[in-house]
Amino acid sequence: LFRSLIVTSSHGRVDPATMAPGPEEAILEEEDLGSEGLLWVPKALIEKVTEAIKNKKEVSKDDVTQLIDSDEIADDVVMVPCDMSDAADIEDVDNCIETMGASKVAEVFVNARTKFLDSLKSMSEEEKASLRQEMTGAEYKEMMEEEMNAYAEAMGMECGESELEEEDEEEEVDEAAEPPNKKAKTA
């Protein structure tokens, strides 16, 4: 469900009225991760794919794969957001290219980019100014690292506490199971 692809950003909030989260984003919001349903993609690539869709040309599997997985990007690449909130009906992101075809998946991204740009039109200039509309690859990587750390910290606190309790219980059991030390007999 593009859940693994949706990134959050503390760099600017999207108006909830224009960016309704899907079920996965709602779950993440409950965990205070602030997901907005935005997926950042390379600007030149989404423009290339948009042009291909507009001209009813095939989109390569490689291009779509790069849209889905924007992890390996150069620091100077310009990244732009796509509003993926309408992509909730895609259940198997890992195999969506094989099941839907590269052009159909590309269309989802083009529509998501269009939705983001259309939502900007309904915002005030102040709202637009506070919303991050582009970033470099380096900024994107930094944002993703912050998001992963925040996620790991949130998950670590929940898991870490129970793991510590289990370790304490195990130590108590181990101590109780050990027989007391016997003194050696001296003659």
Image (cartoon, rainbow, N blue to C red):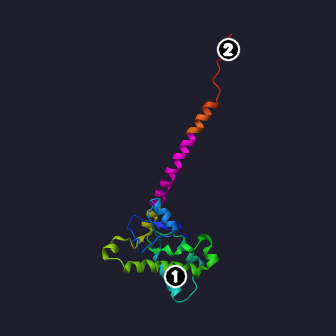
Q: Whole-percent x and y of residue 31?
A: 47, 59
**Residue 185 location, quadrant:** top right
SS at circle 1: helix
Q: Whole-percent x and y of residue 103?
A: 58, 82
Residue at coordinates 58% horizontally, 36% vertically from top-left?
171
Q: Which residue is mark 2?
A: 185
Query: Is 139 rendered above or below residue 118?
Result: above
Quarter of the image with the C terminus in it: top right
* Circle number at residue 49: 1
* Circle number at residue 11: none
Front residue of 69/125: it is: 125
Residue at coordinates 49% horizontally, 62% vertically from top-left?
28
Q: Whole-percent x and y of residue 57?
A: 56, 87
Magenta part of the chain: 145-167
What kind of secondary structure does the magenta stretch mostly adopt?
helix
Residue at coordinates 59% horizontally, 79% vertically from top-left?
102
Quarter of the image with the N terminus in it: bottom right
Residue 157 in magenta stretch = yes
SS at circle 2: loop
Badge count: 2
Front residue of 44/186: it is: 186
Q: Residue furthest left?
A: 126
